[in-house]
Image (cartoon, helix red, strand yellow):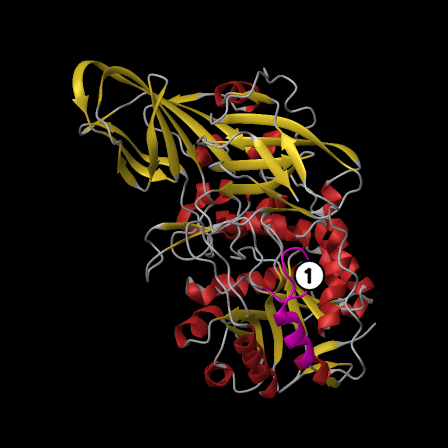
């Protein structure tokens, strides 16, 4: 047991100054059987502490229904076993390039822009979640012999709002839930962010990727005393679909790290190891200075150009950072652990069965709902997945433009059963006019809810309406297909399988064999957009929009002998249904 406190200029462990050399590693982005390896990699790089967020929406998919809410405790036990300390950032909002910034869509669908304020309806749900989550943090605080040193209040709130009473209430809630370790906030090193996001009596930290001297000077204008810490040193960056790869020069990043440490500050590498957005949990951003422009969905890989790459291997950044961090150790650093086992040879997978999307929807979809206007994903209880909208164009009438208003995010459109195009954007018009009578289907997928900025929590689906010429078409039927439905045991038992139709949208199924499990990557040449499951584990979204990167397959997902693959292709592609696993 030990006592960790915030001193006038330093962090203190049993009264002695200590510097936190921390790295972000999100337990929910790494397969649990690989936690120990990734933690050993961070320790070998020279880190003494690990930071993790907690995604509320992952653990409470419906009000009062909790899923694996003890995962954080198991991760903290792994941190302790690795001989490291821990920093916990429970939110309730986390950003993290994660779906809806970690806020459950059922909640933001109810409270809208009242989220992240002192609103009583919002806070009653926050309290229920915290009282469920936080006992596993409290039980593992350093004063009780565990690894937890600090807990964060909200996350980068100064980038969003100025309801400081909300922050004060969150801090009081954390204390009432039994948290006794120091609390902190983290914000950008700008005056409006530090004034909006910091709380008197709570340690303030700053987030940046370079310019340590300037950033810490800004922090000192607001907090003349207290330890200096860069809570997020952005040593890499995330990527968006259809955008160039994001890479940061390793030597430039190492120089920025050295500048932070030369200032006498503590640091948290964001990310030390990024991992993967399994299960379609990747969030999205909005372009523009007000973050209200074009949607920019985040890719499945959360490699982040981190020192430890997506597969757990050391990069050039790792070795440069290790050289710097070694200067702040009392003894030699441990050697990196052996690399995880990899698949010994490539495997070709023939997908021998196929079912159209309509048939899959009949088996796995929710109840169809008819309403005068299109129901949103939130109203249908769909967080990750897609919705089929059906509406009739009355007739007889001549062809007019068909417009989808408030589309979020991407729709494949069929007119009288024939594919008519793909729509992408908020207010979009089908390329060819539509005459009446006609039956229109729109298969809409959420590409990830916004995780940062003023449009966090916005609804998904068709949020405006379907117009023929300038006339709204009413009586819209909507039915959701949740990705979670595929995870139920025996979920595909009732699907009417048939022979594959190369290039067609729908669900494909196949098998492959491996002699021994090992890490692999899954390539989908010729496919367009969709999701892949291996042995029931959702690897995440693939999309030919790029940046081209195969899906990471953790070794523990595979099994010796036969393995199952499902591919849900949403748009159709020209390639034959063969995957390469290597």
Displayed quadrant of residue 437: top left
Residue marked by disc 1: 313
Mark 1: secondary structure: loop
* Residue closest to the eye, 180 or 351: 351
Q: Quadrant of the N terminus?
A: bottom right
Position in image of residue 435 (x %, y %) = 21, 18
Q: Quadrant of the C terminus?
A: top right
Q: Which residues are magenta?
A: 306-323
* Residue closest to the eye, 246 or 131: 246
How would you rate the neighbour count of disc 1 (Cα within 10 Å): few for under 14, some for 14-19, many for 20 or more?
Answer: some
Q: Is residue 416 visible?
A: yes
442 relative to 212, above or below: above
Position in image of residue 213 (x %, y %) = 49, 85
**Which residue is drawn at the image coordinates 46% and 21% (left, top)?**
368
Position in image of residue 511 (x %, y %) = 68, 29
Question: Left or right: where does residue 372 sit relative to residue 60?
Answer: left
63 relative to 501, above or below: below
């Amino acid at each position: 047991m030990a006592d960790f406190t915030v001193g006038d200029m330093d962090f203190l462990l049993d009264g002695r100054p200590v510097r936190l050399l921390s790295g972000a590693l999100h337990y929910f982005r790494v397969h649990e059987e690989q936690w120990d390896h990734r933690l050993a990699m961070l320790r070998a790089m020279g880190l003494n502490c690990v930071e993790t967020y907690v995604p509320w929406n992952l653990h409470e998919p419906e009000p009062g229904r909790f899923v694996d809410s003890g995962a954080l405790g198991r991760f903290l036990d792994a941190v302790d076993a690795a001989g490291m300390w821990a920093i916990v950032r429970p939110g309730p909002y986390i950003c993290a390039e994660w779906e809806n910034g970690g806020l459950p869509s059922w909640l933001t669908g109810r409270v809208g822009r009242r989220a992240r304020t002192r609103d009583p309806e919002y806070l009653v749900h926050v309290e229920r979640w915290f009282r469920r989550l936080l006992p596993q943090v409290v039980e593992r605080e350093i004063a009780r012999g565990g690894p937890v040193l600090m807990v964060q209040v909200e996350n980068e709130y100064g980038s969003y709002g100025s309801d400081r009473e909300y922050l004060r209430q969150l801090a009081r809630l954390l204390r009432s839930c039994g948290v006794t370790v120091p609390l902190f906030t983290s914000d950008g090193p700008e005056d409006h962010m530090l004034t909006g996001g910091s709380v008197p009596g709570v340690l303030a930290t700053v987030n940046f990727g370079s310019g340590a001297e300037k950033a810490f000077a800004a922090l000192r204008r607001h907090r003349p005393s207290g330890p200096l810490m860069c809570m997020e040193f952005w040593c890499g960056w995330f990527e968006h679909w259809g955008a160039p790869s994001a890479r940061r020069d390793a030597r430039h990043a190492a120089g920025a790290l050295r500048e932070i440490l030369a200032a006498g500050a503590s640091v948290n590498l964001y990310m030390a190891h990024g991992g993967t957005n399994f299960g379609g949990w990747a969030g999205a951003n909005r372009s523009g200075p007000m973050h209200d422009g074009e949607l920019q969905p985040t890719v499945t890989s959360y490699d982040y150009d981190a020192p430890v790459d997506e597969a757990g291997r050391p990069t050039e950044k790792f070795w440069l950072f290790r050289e710097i961090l070694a200067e702040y150790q009392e003894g030699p650093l441990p050697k990196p652990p052996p690399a995880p086992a990899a698949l010994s040879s490539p495997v070709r997978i023939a997908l021998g069965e196929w079912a159209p999307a309509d048939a899959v929807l009949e088996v796995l979809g929710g109840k169809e709902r008819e309403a005068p206007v299109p129901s949103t994903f939130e109203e249908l209880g769909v967080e990750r997945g897609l919705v089929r909208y059906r509406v009739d164009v009355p007739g007889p009438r001549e062809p007019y433009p068909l417009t989808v208003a408030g589309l979020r995010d991407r729709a494949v459109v069929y007119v009288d059963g024939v594919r008519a195009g793909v729509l992408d954007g908020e207010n979009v018009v089908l390329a060819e006019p539509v005459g009446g009578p006609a039956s229109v289907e729109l298969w809409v997928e959420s590409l990830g809810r916004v995780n940062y900025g003023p449009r966090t929590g916005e609804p998904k689906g068709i949020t405006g309406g379907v117009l023929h010429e300038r006339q709204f078409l009413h009586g819209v039927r909507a039915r959701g297909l949740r990705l979670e439905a595929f995870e139920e045991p025996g979920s595909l038992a009732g699907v009417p399988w048939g022979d594959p139709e190369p290039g067609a949208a729908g669900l494909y199924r196949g098998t492959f064999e491996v002699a021994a499990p090992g890490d692999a990557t899954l390539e989908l040449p010729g496919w367009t957009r969709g999701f892949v499951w291996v042995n029931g584990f959702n690897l995440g979204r693939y999309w030919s929009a790029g940046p081209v990167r195969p899906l990471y397959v953790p070794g523990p997902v595979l099994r010796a002998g036969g393995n199952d693959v499902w591919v849900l292709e949403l748009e159709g592609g020209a390639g034959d249904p063969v995957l390469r696993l290597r």
